[in-house]
Image (cartoon, rainbow, N blue to C red):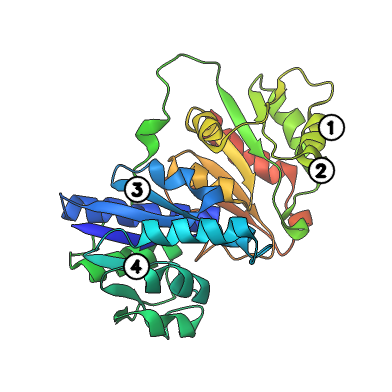
């Protein structure tokens, strides 16, 4: 069976789709999946063995210069690749107008998606041939698992979803135990105060446990360097690709993270993780998987380093 999956962004949403692929692969042995995904996240679907081809889309970049020659050529190449196959099913797991209009409607095959009452942008459901009522009162991972099970006609497994990517990243080498702290995110209100990070780092280094601090841009690098100053057990990592960062996560003892896509990647790799949430309710969109722990408050400033250290200490003993 050949299926086209539409889930273009963002990192957490793309990762949330992986357990549905594992379910489908176990139910349909000859399953072959092509995946339409934003170019920035195209590496992630490659990690799952059910995915045979990535069809990268660049809406975020194209909309900056929609009439340029480069955009026109890239759009033509994208559309040619998308329409090169006849699919047994086209599943829009994104549920947005942009995913339906720029991807789902163009793919060849019966189009499946959420019905208008189960979708963030109801207009998107107009592009689907088959529509499914799926409750919002459950985690996003479970909603997508249900969508796939109904679209591809197999019973939904009762056990917790399996992302199916851990095997790519586990190292057999013996290494010094370490923890990773994801201290950066895109929105200011999701940041944890720097002095709390520093207090936590000092408490953990007193246990002689190494801490690794990743970063993605110069501002994040400067923060990591400030957090590490004069502390011997703290390592500021070099700039890493997503694949390299996944290896770091997979071989860590535990992770502490703010609300970021990398927290969802940690969950996908079945790594013990403490995610810090302020105003965001993690019940329906938080990290899904084994050994996922939340610390919540009405704002990030109200989560203390003592709380985080107590929770982390239980994971690294």
Residue 169 is situated, as x and y percent measured from the top left of the image, at: 43, 30
Residue 116 percent across, percent down from the top left: 42, 85
| Res. 15 in view | yes
Residue 9 visible? The answer is no
Alpha carbon separation for disc pair 1 and 2:
9 Å
SS state under label 1: helix
Along the line of sight, which residue is nearer the eye, 314 or 75? 75
Looking at marks 2 and 3 on the same chain, the residue that comes earlier in the sequence is marked by: 3
Residue 53 image label: 3
Q: Is residue 271 left or right of residue 281?
A: left
Foreground mark, 3 or 1, reads: 3
Q: 37 above or below 111?
A: above
Q: Which residue is mark 2?
A: 194
Label 1 neighbourhood size at 10 Å, few (<14), some (14-19), many (20+)?
Answer: few
- Disc nearer the start of the sequence (1/2): 2
Between disc 3 and disc 1, whose residue precedes? 3
| Disc 3/disc 1 C-alpha distance (Å) | 42 Å
Q: Residue furthest front?
A: 69
Residue 107's label in the rendered image is 4
Quadrant in the picture for the N terminus: bottom left
CB under 8 Å between callouts 2 and 3? Answer: no
Indicate the secondary structure of the residue bearing disc 2. helix
**Looking at the image, which is closer to me, 123 or 235?**
123
How many neighbours does mark 4 have within 10 angstroms: few (below 14), some (14-19), or many (20 or more)? many
Q: SS for tag 3? A: strand
Q: Position of residue 2 (x, y in %)?
A: 22, 57
Residue matched to label 1: 226
């Amino acid at each position: 069976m050949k299926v086209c999956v539409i889930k273009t962004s963002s990192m957490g949403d793309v990762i949330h789709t992986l357990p549905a692929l594992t379910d489908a692969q176990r139910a349909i042995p000859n399953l072959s999946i092509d995946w339409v995904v934003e170019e920035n996240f195209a590496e992630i679907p490659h990690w799952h063995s059910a995915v045979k081809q990535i069809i990268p889309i660049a809406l975020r970049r194209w909309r900056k210069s929609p009439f340029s020659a480069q955009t026109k050529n890239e759009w033509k190449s994208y559309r040619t690749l998308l329409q090169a196959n006849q699919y047994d099913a086209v599943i829009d797991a994104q549920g947005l107008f942009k995913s339906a209009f720029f991807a789902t409607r163009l793919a060849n095959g019966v189009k499946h998606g959420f019905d208008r009452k189960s979708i963030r942008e109801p207009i998107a459901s107009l592009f689907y041939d088959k529509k499914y009522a799926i409750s919002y009162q459950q985690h996003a991972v479970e909603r997508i698992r249900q969508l796939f099970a109904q679209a591809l006609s197999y019973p939904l497994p009762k056990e917790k979803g399996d992302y199916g990517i851990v095997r790519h990243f586990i190292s057999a080498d013996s290494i010094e135990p370490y923890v990773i702290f994801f201290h950066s995110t895109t929105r200011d209100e999701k940041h944890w105060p720097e002095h709390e990070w520093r207090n936590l780092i000092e408490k953990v280094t007193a246990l002689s446990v190494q801490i690794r601090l990743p970063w993605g841009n110069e501002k994040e690098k400067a923060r990591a360097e400030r957090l590490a100053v004069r502390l011997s057990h703290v390592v500021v990592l070099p700039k890493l690709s997503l694949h390299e960062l996944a290896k770091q996560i997979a071989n860590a003892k535990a992770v502490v993270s703010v609300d970021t896509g990398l927290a969802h990647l940690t969950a996908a790799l079945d790594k013990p993780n403490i995610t810090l949430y302020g105003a965001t309710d993690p019940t329906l969109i938080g990290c899904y998987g084994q050994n996922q722990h939340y610390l919540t408050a009405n704002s990030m400033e109200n989560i203390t380093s003592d709380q985080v250290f107590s929770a982390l200490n239980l994971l690294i003993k």
